[in-house]
Amino acid sequence: MTASITDVARAAGVSASTVSRALRGRPGVSEEVRAQITAVAAQLGYTASRSAASLASGRTFTIGVVVPYVGRWFFGTVLDSAEQVFSAAGYDVLLYNLGSPETRKRFFTRLPVRKRVDAVLSLLIPDEEESAALRSLGVPLATTVGGTRPGFSVVGIDDRAGTESAVRHLVNLGHRRIGMISGSSGPLHWTTPIERRNAYLDVLTDAGIAHDAALEADGDYTVEGGERAMTELLAVSRPPTAVFAQSDEMAMGALRALRRHRLKVPDDVSVVGFDDHELADVVGLTTVAQPVAEQGAEAARLLLRQLDDPDAEPPAEQVRMPIRLVLRETTAPPRPRGPQ
C-alpha cells in the first residue's frame, strides 16, 4: 500500500501538519526535524497527492531545472538533493541539459518551460537577455551559482573567502612558488573561475609574492584537465612547490600527474582543492569544504516556500552557505632543498 502523510507522521513522531510544512519547505520546522521527515518520507516512498491540489490551483506541480553539464559532480549533486526535496513535496522535475551553445540558444529562444512548470531552478548563469527571458515566465526563480541578480533567489558561497583561506594556508606554510589550476573554460558566463583567480592574486600580492603567469594553467574543471594542467606546470623552468586547484576534481587530476612523474605529495609538491568532493577524504586531499548538496536542498526549499505563500515577503536575494578549510595530507612546508 502507498504510504500516507499519517504514516510518515507516525514514523517520524510528529504531527501530519508538521510533515506537510517540512516537505513543502514552509517555516516553523527546524532543519534537523525537516531532514528527519524528508528521510522518513523517502524511506516509506511517500509523495504528496497532487491531483486535487492541481485542479484547485492550476499548478503543474513540476519544477524546471536547467543545467550546463548534468554529468559534472557539482551540478549532479545539487540536482540530486534538490530533486529529493521537490519529490518529497509532490513535485516532478523537468530537466534541461544545456551543454552546448546551440542547445542553450534554442532553449532561451523557445522557452519550452513556459506554462509547463511552476518554478525554475537554474544551475547556469544566464546573461541579461536570458535572465529577462526567465523572468518573463512569471514563476519563482532560484540558482546556486553566481552572484545576486534581479528576480532570483541565490544560494551559494563566498568564493573569494574560500580561495583566500586555501592560498593563504600555502603561504603560511612557507611556499613562494604557488601555482593555480583554474577552470577558465568552464560553463558560459560562469563567474566562479574569475572570483577564485582574483582572490588567488590578492593573496599573492598581500604576501609580497610576484605573480608569475607561467604558474597558471587551465584544467577545465575535470580530472583529465587537472592532470594535463599539472603536467604543464611541472614543465616550466621553475615549477611550483604548491598548487591551488579551483576544484577537487582538478586537484585529483593534479595528484595523478604528480604520481606519474614520481613526485611525492606533499614532500615535493603540496596540493589544495576546493569543494570537499566525496572522494577528497579518500585521497587525503586538503580542500575548502562547501555544502554542495545543502545548496541544492536550500534552493529547492526557497522555491517551495514562494509557491506555497506567493504573498509572503520575498526571500533574501542571496543566502550564503558556510565554508571551511579542511586540512588533510596533501599540504606541508616546502623542503629546504626544493625550489622556492
Image (cartoon, rainbow, N blue to C red):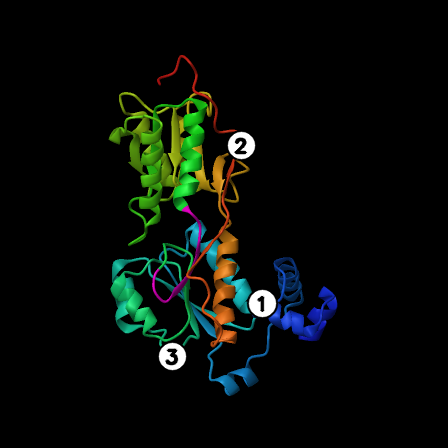
| Residue 249 locus on image (x, y percent) | 43, 41
Q: Determine which of the numbered discs, if any, sits on residue 115 in the image.
A: 3
Measured as percent of width and height from the top left, residue 320 is found at 46, 53
Q: CA distance from mark 2 to mark 3?
A: 49 Å
Q: Residue furthest front?
A: 313
Callout 3 crowding tier (Cα within 10 Å): few <14, some 14–19, many ≥20 = few
In what element is the residue under mark 3?
A: loop
Q: Residue at x 39, y 34 (%)?
A: 244
Residue mark closest to the camera, 1 vs 2: 1
Q: Which residues are magenta?
A: 149-158
19 sits left or right of 52 in the view:
right
Counting residues from the N terminus, which is met first, the one under dot 2 or under dot 3?
3
**Which residue carries the number 2 mark?**
328
Mark 1, other Cα within 10 Å: few <14 / some 14–19 / many ≥20 = few
Measured as percent of width and height from the top left, residue 327 is found at: 52, 33
What amino acid does circle 2 point to? Arg
> Which mark is first along the chain, 1 or 3?
1
Q: Between marks 1 and 2, how big is the CA–CA gap?
A: 37 Å
Q: Is residue 157 magenta?
A: yes
Residue 263 vs residue 14, the one in the foreground? 14
Residue 337 in view, yes or no: yes
Q: Residue at x 31, y 61 (%)?
A: 126
Secondary structure under the numbered disc 2 in the rendered image:
loop
What residue appears at the point 42 percent right and 13 percent down from the top-left corner?
A: 336
Q: Horizontal and vertical percent for residue 287?
A: 48, 37
Nearest the viewer among 321 and 144 is 321
Q: How many marks?
A: 3
Give the residue at mark 1.
Answer: 27
Instruction: Point out which mark residue 236 bears.
Output: none
User: Callout 2: 10 Å neighbours few (<14), some, many (20+)?
Assistant: some
Quarter occupied by the C terminus:
top left
Q: Vertical placement of 322 versus 317: above or below?
A: above
